[in-house]
Image (cartoon, helix red, strand yellow):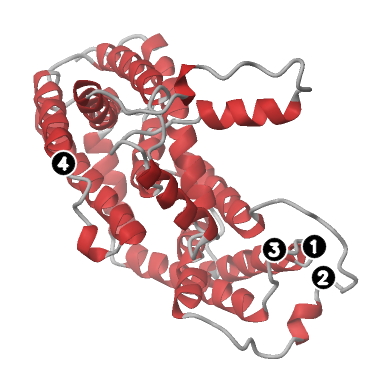
Amino acid sequence: MRKSAAWPVTWMYAALVVYASLYPFANWRDQGIAPWSFLGAPLPRYWSAFDVTLNLLGYVPLGALLALLILRSSHRGAPVLVAMLCAGALSLLMEGIQSYLPQRVASREDWLLNTAGAAAGAMLALQLARAGWLAWWDAWQQRWLAPQSRGVLALLLAWPAALLFPAAIPFGMGQVWNRLFDFLVLLLPPALAPVPAAVAVAGSLAPGTELLCVALGLLVPSLLGYCVVHSMRHRLTLLLMLLAVGFAATGLSAALSWGPTHTWAWLTPTTAAGAGLALVLALSLSRTSARLCASLALLALGLSVGLLNQAPDSAYFAQTLHAWEQGRFIRFHGFAQWLGWVWPYAAMGVALVHVGQRGQGH
């Protein structure tokens, strides 16, 4: 990863760690204990394997990214130690702040697991660098990607994580208008509150509209990739990789929500037809100029967001959200949810930048 791209990715992941650590940001109060008192607390009685795994693995990417930044800098001394100390300090701060959140429990064990995870990530990054993977990554970027590719690359790397949060329609992201409406109603006095729009009416999208939403959700990442990948062979490879990753992430989301036996329950005939349409469209546009691809991506994003925000939530979807927001995913759902909400709008901004750039034809 180029140094210019590594910094924003690291800051973004650190922000997601802060969000996941302090969610739900409600009922702040002084509970009469020192924020560092958890360091001397007795061992917890109840400690699930899920919590251990989440606390350990959650800091692995942060440790790896911090180590990569150090390896990229002019001062390459002790990348593992520095990354572990920085990530450990962030975790310690988050645990201390959790003392002011009644819905969260500050834990010494969480801090130790976070620090250990960061150390493991840093050691992994160091071993990959010694094995020549960083040099290979640089060569791959120069061979595959246009110079101004970091925005698109960050979006494509975040896309699988954004797909993990359950969506009303597979591959459909950015469905936030109902939530924004509810938030606006809470802020305004009753006399000024807006009247509920048609988006709140019960029902479901027509099969043809749902098919189009699935197709657009899969097509947009491909068009964004085409903005920075110009070789025909590389574009086709990227397309197949995106389809595979998209299906895997959506299947993992279903498995986490309903259990492993329902991993592919979302793959209905309508969804399969939408994926096939996306593949046909992406193949037919594989020779299109980068600037036109950015324009089409912008158009597809606008149409997709508009259609998805007219789709009401079904009872099954509401039950799935409840399982994520109140169940064992309460610590994880926050950043995945925000990624799913924000990703299409961030993609609009990146596509708009590429539309305004000159000299992007083949």
Residue 141 falls in image quadrant? top left
Do callouts 3 and 2 mark residues in contact (Cβ within 8 Å)? Answer: no
Residue 184 in picture, x, y percent from top left: 67, 26
Give the side of residue 311 with respect to residue 328, left or right.
left
Amino acid type of the residue that numbered disc 1 sits on in the rendered structure:
Tyr
Residue 252 falls in image quadrant? bottom left
The residue that mark 3 highlights is 103
> Mark 4 and mark 1: span between their CA atoms?
45 Å
Dot 4 falls on a residue whose secondary structure is: loop
Closer to us: mark 4 or mark 3?
4
Say few, some or many: other residues with alpha carbon within 10 Å of mark 2 (under 14 / 14 to 19 / 20 or more): some
Q: Residue 268 carries which label?
A: 4
Do callouts 1 and 2 mark residues in contact (Cβ within 8 Å)? Answer: yes
The residue that mark 1 highlights is 100
Amino acid type of the residue that numbered disc 3 sits on in the rendered structure:
Gln
> Mark 3 and mark 1: span between their CA atoms?
9 Å
Identify the residue shown where x is 70% and y is 19%.
193
Dot 3 falls on a residue whose secondary structure is: loop
Considering depth in this image, is 86 or 189 the residue closer to the camera?
A: 189
Mark 2 vs mark 4: which is more N-terminal? 2
Identify the residue shown where x is 58% and y is 56%.
20
Dot 1 falls on a residue whose secondary structure is: loop
Closer to us: mark 2 or mark 4?
4
Mark 1 vs mark 2: which is more N-terminal? 2
Considering depth in this image, is 271 or 231 the residue closer to the camera?
A: 271
> Mark 2 and mark 4: span between their CA atoms?
50 Å
Dot 2 falls on a residue whose secondary structure is: loop
> Mark 1 and mark 2: span between their CA atoms?
8 Å
The residue that mark 2 highlights is 35
Give the side of residue 228 with respect to residue 341, left or right.
left
